[in-house]
Image (spheres, rainbow, N blue to C red):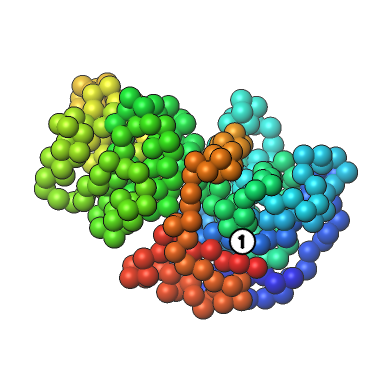
Amino acid sequence: MKTIVLQQAGKFEYTESTLDKNLKPDEALVKVHSIGICGTDFHAYAGNQPFFSYPRILGHELGVEVMEVGAKVDHVKTGDRCSVEPYHNFGNDQAVRRGFTNCGENVSVLGVHQDGGMREYLKIPASYLHKSDQLTYDQLALIEPLGIGCHAVNRAQVTAQDDVLVIGAGPIGLAAIEFAVASGARVVSMDINEDRLHFAASVMKIKGTVVANKEDTEVQLRKQFDGDLPTIVFDATGNKHSMSKAMEYVASAGKLVFIGLFQGDFSFHDPYFHRKEMTLMASRNALPSDFKQIIRMMEEGKINTDAWITHRSSFEDMVGQFDRWLQPEAKVIKAIVSL
């Protein structure tokens, strides 16, 4: 079967591989139709993705077709279109027993810690498949990145009474915006990239935008919220400086949620943190319930991601396109690879 392997940083190889089609009772064989390219893939290609080893088959944002199911599988059948939940737990550790499958002690992410979906076919435990009778394969491939934002918003318990700032207008930040807006909150987007802010303002129902790295950043922010600060701030940058500064933007008794991951340490002034009685949270991956919520909302027309897909490629042409997608002038929001 057609397969793309990231042999080492900066080097993809288009090749043929074999697949053992013998299914365990709880497994399914799926055909991959759409693959979303995300920041993790770009970081792995650039050689700066944490907890990563080469060679690796990338691909964890997937829209797939069920080809065959094992004897014990009854929630999906041959021909079903599905999104793939890529956070796999091999063991029943404490977090998993408590229902936190997004952050199990031994969680293994498809396409990151184990080989993923940049290939024609994939065997997978069927419990990680979420079907839809209405959504396209491209839409199903976007469920996973949407899930990151959905989980963060659910975790922060955003309501219509909240003023929300989302720092970072990449795909994960946009996903957080989608669900914060759907919760009825007033939402502002902040980024250093004015092109991305323009995209957020033109495509999404946000209150306004703020250009970061200006001396008057807080002044700009207060203007957006009638003199107030946001009650909830999401930082989706994974940038040390941004994450350190984010605490300054949170209202007293507010929440700061880190979605982006920074591989390192940073510090904050504890009296300032306590004075505001701030809640500091991390948000990792997504839960099965988040996948189900997103599929329902997309089927009901409450979320439209058509404008997100700015770049496309066939599977055969992807290797030649990838370097160009990394360039800022390409203005990639989301690239989709089709098989």
Toward the front, the furthest residue is 301
Query: Closer to the camera, 220 or 3?
Result: 220
- The percent position of residue 7, horizontal first and vertical second, equals 58, 70
Camera sees residue 31: yes
Q: Quadrant of residue 26?
A: top right
User: What quarter of the picture does the N terminus occupy?
Assistant: bottom right
Please name the residue shown 70% across and 66% down the image. 120
In the image, taking residue 305 as reference, residue 87 lies left or right, namely right
Q: Is residue 261 left or right of residue 123?
A: left
Is residue 205 toward the left or the right of residue 268 in the image?
right
> How many neighbours does mark 1 have within 10 angstroms: few (below 14), some (14-19), or many (20 or more)?
many
Dot 1 falls on a residue whose secondary structure is strand
The residue type indicated by label 1 comes to Ser
**Residue bearing the label numbered 1:** 34
The residue located at (47%, 60%) in the rendering is: 309
Quarter holding the C terminus? bottom right
Where residue 169 appears, as percent x and y from the top left, is: 34, 51
Identified at 23% across, 24% down, the residue is 252
Which residue of the protein is positioned furthest toward the right in this rendering?
Answer: 71
Count of marks overlaid on the render? 1
Q: Identify which residue is drawn at 62% across, 50% down.
A: 135
Residue 177: x percent and y percent?
A: 38, 42
Front-lying residue, 300 or 43: 300
Q: x%, y% of residue 4?
A: 62, 70
Query: Is 119 displayed left or right of 324 in the figure?
Result: right
Quadrant of the image occupied by residue 234: top left
- Residue 7 visible? The answer is no
